[in-house]
Amino acid sequence: MRGTISTIERYGLHNMNAALEQQENYQRVARAIHYLNEHQQAQPSLSELSSYIGVSEFHLQRIFSEWAGVSPKQFLQFLTKENAKRLLRESSVLDAALACGLSGSGRLHDLMIKAERVTPGEYRSRGQGLQIVYGSCPSPFGYCFIAANHRGVCKLAFFDKPDGEAALLAELQDEWVAAELQRDDSQVAAIYQSMFAAKSAGKPLTVLLKGTEFQMKVWEALLAIPLGEVCSYQQLAESMGMPSSTRAVASAIARNNIAYLIPCHRVIRGSGEFSQYRWGGERKQAMLLHESVAGI
C-alpha cells in the first residue's frame, strides 16, 4: 500500500515539476519575444539573444522551437508589418464563419466552447446565492487565474508578478460582490486540463458572459475568428453589421474577462500592428504565434 502511495506521490511531483519547467520556459520565451520586439530593426543574432536570456544558444533554440514551433529567426519574420497585413488579407474567413452560425474552423469551435449569458436576475443580484471556485495554475502563457461556478468559467486571466493573483481576486470580488468565493486549486486544475482535453473528449467547455448586451455580442463575435487567423477592429465591427462602431467594439474587447477562451488576442490594428493586450503584449504575440504555427 505504501509503495502505491509513494508511486502516486512521485507521479504528482513529476507533474508539478513539469508544470514549473513549462512556466520557466514560457518566461524565457516571453523575454525573448520582448527583446526581439525591442530590437527588431537590429536583427539580433541567436548568440546575442541567448546571452540576454542567460541560456546557451542550443537551449534557447530548442525551447523556443519546441514551445512556439519556429526558431527565433523565423519569429523575427513573423513580427514584420507586411506579414501581419498578409494575415489580415487572409482573414476574410471571418465573415464565412459568422454566416455559418459560429461553426467555423476556429480552435474554440474545435474545443466546443459554449457561451452562456448571465440571466437578468443573476446580473441584478451580482451573484447572490452563487458559489464560485477560483485558483491558479501554471500554463503555457504564464500563471493562469481561473474562476468558475456551476454554469461555467466566469473569469480567466494571466499574471506574472507575485501579487498578481491578489489583484485578480479583488477584481473577481468586485464583479461578483454577493457570491460565495472558495479557493479550490484542484478543481481549477481540472478546468484548465479540460481546456485542452475538450476536443478529444467531445465535451463542451462553457464560458459564462456577464456584461451589457453590446459587450456580449462583441465577445460572441470573437468566437468566430478561426485558429491561426487575425482580424482588425474594423473588420470585426463590419462583420457584426456595425461598421461605424469600431471604437465601441474595441472598448468591449478591452472589457473581456475571459482571456484566451474568448480570443480577443486575435484582434489587431488595421495597419497590421499588434495592439495593446490587457494581459501583456508579449503574451498576445506568443498566443498568436503558438496558434498559427503549432495549431493548438
Image: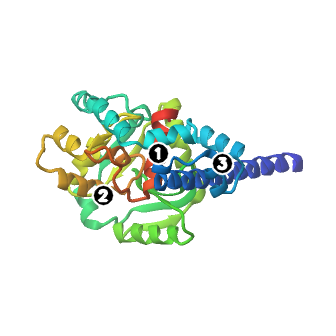
Q: Earlier in the sequence, mark 1 or mark 2?
A: 2
Residue 97 visible within the image: no
Inter-mark Cα distance, 2 to 3: 37 Å
Q: Residue 188 in the image: state x and y as whole percent.
A: 54, 54
Q: Earlier in the sequence, mark 3 or mark 1?
A: 3
Q: Residue 149 in the image: state x and y as whole percent.
A: 43, 55
Residue on which the image places disc 3: 47
Residue 130 vs 99, above or below: the answer is below
Q: Amino acid at mark 1?
A: Met
Mark 1 residue crowding within 10 angstroms, few (<14) / some (14–19) / many (20+): many
Mark 3 residue crowding within 10 angstroms, few (<14) / some (14–19) / many (20+): few
Residue 185 vs 110, above or below: the answer is below
Residue on which the image places disc 1: 287
Single out the mark in the foreground, 3 or 1: 3
Mark 2 residue crowding within 10 angstroms, few (<14) / some (14–19) / many (20+): some
In which quadrant of the rendered view does residue 64 lie?
top right
Residue on which the image places disc 2: 254
Q: Report helix, strand or loop for mark 3.
A: helix
| Horizontal arrangement in the rendering, residue 17 relative to residue 186 (left or right) | right
Disc number placed over residue 183 in the picture, else none: none
Q: Nearer the viewer, residue 41 or 34?
A: 41
Q: Is the residue under label 3 in contact with that under label 2 (CB below 8 Å)?
A: no
Single out the mark in the foreground, 2 or 3: 3
Q: Residue 81 in the image: state x and y as whole percent.
A: 35, 42
